[in-house]
Amino acid sequence: MAFSTDLRVARCKPSKKSTQCDDLAVHLQASAPRHPFAVWDISEWVVVSQEARGLDPKDWVALQADARDDSQSSWWLFKPIKTASYRRFDDSSEKIASELAGLIGLPAARVELAARDGAVGIISRNVTPDGCSLDSGDTLLSEFDGYLSCAGDNRPKNRVGHSLDNIQRLLDGVRTPGDLAPETSGFDLFAGYLVFDAWIANTDRHAINWGVLTRNDDGNRFLAPSFDHGSALASGVQDKFMATKDAAAYAGRGMAHRFENGSRLPLVEMALDAVMRSGQNGHEWIDRIGDLDAEVVRSVVEAVPGMSEVRRNFVSTLLETNRRRLTA
């Protein structure tokens, strides 16, 4: 699919490589964007590997110069938009989520809108620094009795074993990446991921969509930055149907169905349970979301090029509704 002519395509260079687990290439946005987000032209980038995980084919890409060395920290995952009988909006959801995570200081993969040989989508920066390895939650939880893996083709409807009890046990002793306060534990940060999911209505936090980094030279473990937010912000709802939906009512239907017995558990309740287990360090993420100015959040949504006004209004209302539900 060719990209819309109203998108601004730019030849951009990524920032420096990340070389340590506690010096991650995450996106921290200090202020609201002032201009529409650029669409990176990556047509001349080279494919360095294929991504084996997930149902849809995706390529790891890099600049020519970066592809010639052994570093994977400069790789980006190119995810073209999904089209079946209609266009999904995973690309705008991923970009908005990356920017919002930056506004609250939540470690998350850097995402840029991208175009490659006429195909549009996003590129997501590799969250695994050089010198580290990444294991998914699914791989690590497979050592727990009764856990049902979601890695196969026949994924269980009820994600038995993907529970806060097991995740809290698994993350015992796991540290946090970047510049977070040293007293913030891996589970404190995971609680932040669930708070973030509840805010952006991300219903796809299955056990392959989070992981733990291990530093190869000393074995220290860190919770990996959050990644893969394409199912958030009503990305699968078409504009023509969005015009007739109530965003506030839609927010209330967001369930944690990627967790054990989560099909009727609201994302907000799941997040608040995690925060209660975590304590003040977990509640910090709710405070940060509550302190954001609604106009700053709206400016992030407004900066996505080519988005309809119907979708902008729906997404902005969805975010504000969930913010109020979390901070009530």
Image: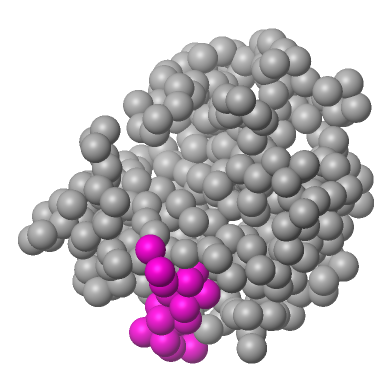
Q: Is 195 covered by the magenta stretch? A: no
The residue nearer to you, when weighing 232 against 192, is 232
The residue nearer to you, when weighing 24 against 147, is 147
The quadrant of the image that shows the C terminus is: bottom right
Up/down of 143 relative to 67, above or below: below
> Which picture quadrant has residue 245?
bottom right
Describe residue 166's horizontal placement relative to residue 33 as left or right.
Answer: left
Residue at 73% in and 63% down = 246
Q: Which color scheme does this rendered protein use?
A: one colour
What secondary structure do most residues of the magenta stretch adopt?
Answer: helix
Up/down of 279 relative to 107, above or below: below
Start and end of the magenta stretch? Answer: 263-281
Q: How many marks?
A: 0
The quadrant of the image that shows the N terminus is: top right
> Which picture quadrant has residue 105?
bottom right
Residue at 63% in and 80% down = 325
Give x and y (percent) for residue 121: 66, 29
Residue at 65% in and 29% down = 86
Q: Is 276 covered by the magenta stretch? A: yes
Give x and y (percent) for residue 185: 38, 74
Up/down of 190 relative to 314, above or below: below
Residue at 30% in and 72% down = 164
Give x and y (percent) for residue 267: 49, 69
Give x and y (percent) for residue 59: 49, 21
Query: Can the viewer see residue 95 in this picture?
Result: no
State the residue lying farthest toward the left: 145
